[in-house]
Amino acid sequence: MADTETLQIKNVHKTFRVGKQDIDVLEDINLNVSAGEFVSVIGASGCGKTTFLRLLVGLEGEYQGDILLNGKRLNGPSINRGIVFQNHRLLPWLTIEKNVGLGLESKKGNNKAQIVQDHIDLVGLKGFCKSYPYQLSGGMSQRAAIARALVNRPEILLLDEPLGALDSLTRMYMQNELERIWKLENITAVMVTHDVEEAVYLSDRIVIMSCRPGKIKRIIPVPLSRPRDRASYDFMRIKEEVLKEFHLQAEEHFAYSI
Amino acid sequence: MRRQIMESAGIQRLFAAVTTLLPAQPAAEAISTSFKLQTPSISRVAIPQVVKTALLGGLIPLLLLVAWEAVTRIELVPSQLLVPPRQVLATFLDLLNSGELQGHLKISILRVLLGFSLGTSAGFLVGAILGLSKRAEKYGGPFFRVLLQIPILGWMPFLLLILGFGELFKIVFISLGAFYPMTLNTFEGIKGVSNEYREVGRVFEFGRLKLLRKIILPAAVPSIFTGIRLGLGTAWMLIVGAELVAATEGVGYMMTMGRQLFQMDVVMVGVVLVGATGYLMNHILKIAEQRLLHWRNTMHA
Amino acid sequence: MNYLDYVSRKISDVYSKSIVLLIIFAAWWLVGAYKLADPTILPPPSKILRTLLELAKEGDLVFHIKMSILRVIKGFLIGGTLGFVLGILMGLSKTAEKLVGPLFHAVRQVPLLGWMPLIVLWCGIGETSKVVFIAIGALYPMVLNTFEGVRGISREYLEVARVFEFKQLKLITTIILPAALPNILTGVRFSLTISWMLVVGAEIFSVSAGGLGDMIWSARDTFRMDIVIVGLIIITLIGITLSKSVKLLETYFLQWRKTSH
Ligand SMILES: Nc1ncnc2c1ncn2[C@@H]1O[C@H](COP(=O)(O)OP(=O)(O)O)[C@@H](O)[C@H]1O
Ligand SMILES: [Mg+2]
């Protein structure tokens, strides 16, 4: 069992020091993620989702507890984990091609250009290699950011509300794209989102977080076959279940489900 | 506020790891707890931050002073070119006791204040007219734009030819120095008043005067103040320049005489004196600005 | 679309832009023509033009321009480079900032012209003193703007560098320099503008052979207002050209900034 679990998060606590006070942001986080799994983290804004991802990628140095990748404790950022930030963070002074190749340059290899091109094709940005970020739409920028995160073939892809800034139609389309890429790359993914439908559509498991301090409230598995039908009964049922955790379920629904 | 702190903490964290140019970062910043710094934690407790900053900042000046003293002791360079620090101090005290220093300083400051008030007032008027009236900007703008491109020091021979070497030249020259930045900043300040504020005035049907008094001028005041400070700075620089060539008293004259008589000590006292005076004048204006513009802090936070 | 409209708007634009200048020019010309003012104090436009041509023909003008520009280039390169390095160092390292910052800000309080007597004492009245003087003036804006640029870099970009495990050199070349470039170029522009003003001052305050400052200063000795005015015009034109060229550089190098902000 433990062998297939790429990522193990054990009793993780995280506090921020603001002024003279320690503020608990994450408390008692326990989670195992298996290789190739797609896990979503969902929770209200400000409950520490971003902090959680930053811990996984290694941008937050000090924490209590253990985060193990293949049994080894994480120590700072590494290119075996890729991240797509909340806003794309493409470097505005570099072309898309250069942005995507950003992480690759530390490796030696003469097929660098080919790798970059492959990933640009993968996210469907063929023909935009020489464009600058200001010339891309929001959806395209996120695609480029995903390509940039994947280019080192990381074991884990971390996504922080990658589609949060997009309009709902583009978002649905990008969800399909994300699923396609995830399958093709056969990668372990941890995605933060605040969109319940997105979580149900994409995830194998949904981690629901409660606020202040951020704790794991419940983990809901999504045992649906892919591609998923957003209108199916099972899909709706799981969506309801997630929403229930946020007390957002419609009142009258109680009435006829009694 | 916190955001800024966080950002600088982020940079600092990064460079703590990256910068090997200089000794490791002092880890005393409480914010950078989230990144492992290799600095031993002893330094965190031992010396308070303020003291450390003062020590670091004073290090190079102290070394320079020691080097200066050493060089003059072993007479590495001719004493004409570098007098010992003691002598500069002694000269300063001499000049102070004889009242010579105060005399020169007083004259220079009087000239600057006179020229500065003239130039600033003129600059305010021109800037305000160009900023308020579309027509004035349309017709007069190009002229002033060209005028303000003329390097100020270039005016010197021009004005000297017209006005001679007297007091008038210095006053006009200095006012020109204050006029430049004041005109520009008043104009830009007024032009930069957001249309949203103007519309507030229009909603309440303010008359022209009320709009000016209640909305446009207050909103332009920060920029105008910048103009005032820059103007005073420029004026102070120019008076030194004007006195270098055309005066028989004033700090600039004192320095020129020092140079001609190879009195290095007098020149050095002069350099420090003009620096300190300039700093003080700017500082006084800054305090006044803070008092007057206390609302700005909350607005931009 | 509406071509006539466009033409008439253009014409009225040119008219309003030049009318005041034209009136001043006409008044100046009339004063000269009717001998209303002492021609040594206010030489008529025709005289200015003749002097300009004369100076140009004899090669004096080119010589003076060359002298001044050479000095500016030397001073700017020395001061600007030093300022760039200092600004980067102070921006990158808090320790460097604490070490050099206070001294830098103290020295900066001395009005530039206040350095002149000291520089002349140390370096004589030759080329060196002028270049040093210009270098000091070029230094300040470069340090301040570069420092601002480096310190202002968003934490977000620096984190991207950490995620990809950039080495120091790569961090500087791919993130820090490009991100600080807008401020650095502003620094270059201010630096050059100040250098150009100071070369005139340097040539006035420390007796020199050649240079536009020297040209107008000597003209004052011989009561040649016409030469002074020609000099002022040339100095102004070159100053505008310098700052416009850097602006062009800015638009060229900062295309990526377009609507991304
Ligand atoms: N560097 C930091 N210093 C202090 N507090 C922080 C820092 N980063 C995040 N926080 C705080 O931690 C909490 C969780 O933030 P975050 O992880 O960004 O939430 P989310 O992504 O779920 O919206 C917030 O209250 C935020 O203010
Ligand atoms: Mg977040």
Image (cartoon, helix red, strand yellow):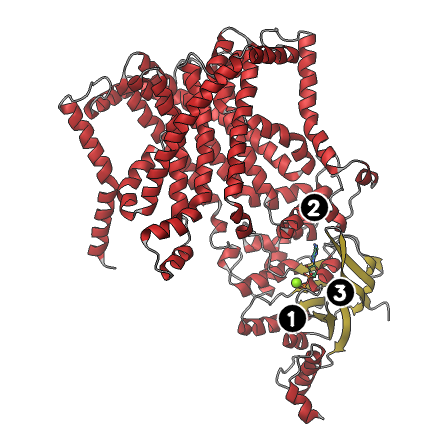
Please state the chain letter of the residue tagged with numbered disc 1 in the rendered image.
A
Whether the residues at callouts 2 and 1 have beta carbons within 8 Å, the answer is no
Tag 2: amino acid: Leu
Please state the chain letter of the residue tagged with numbered disc 2 in the rendered image.
B
Residue B241 at least partly seen: yes
Answer left or right for C180 relative to A18.
Answer: left
The mark found on residue B14 in the picture is: 2
* Mark whose residue sits in front, 3 or 2: 3
Tag 1: amino acid: His
Of residues C34 and B171, the one drawn nearer to the viewer in this rendering:
B171
Pointer 1: what residue? A194
Discs 3 and 2 carry the same chain letter: no
Task: Judge: label 1 CB < 8 Å from ligand 1.
Answer: no
Task: Judge: label 2 CB < 8 Å from ligand 1.
Answer: no
Q: Residue at x 63, y 30 (%)?
A: C102
Q: Label 1's element?
A: loop
Answer left or right for B110 relative to C158.
Answer: left
Q: Please tell me in which quadrant of the rendered image residue A188 appears.
A: bottom right
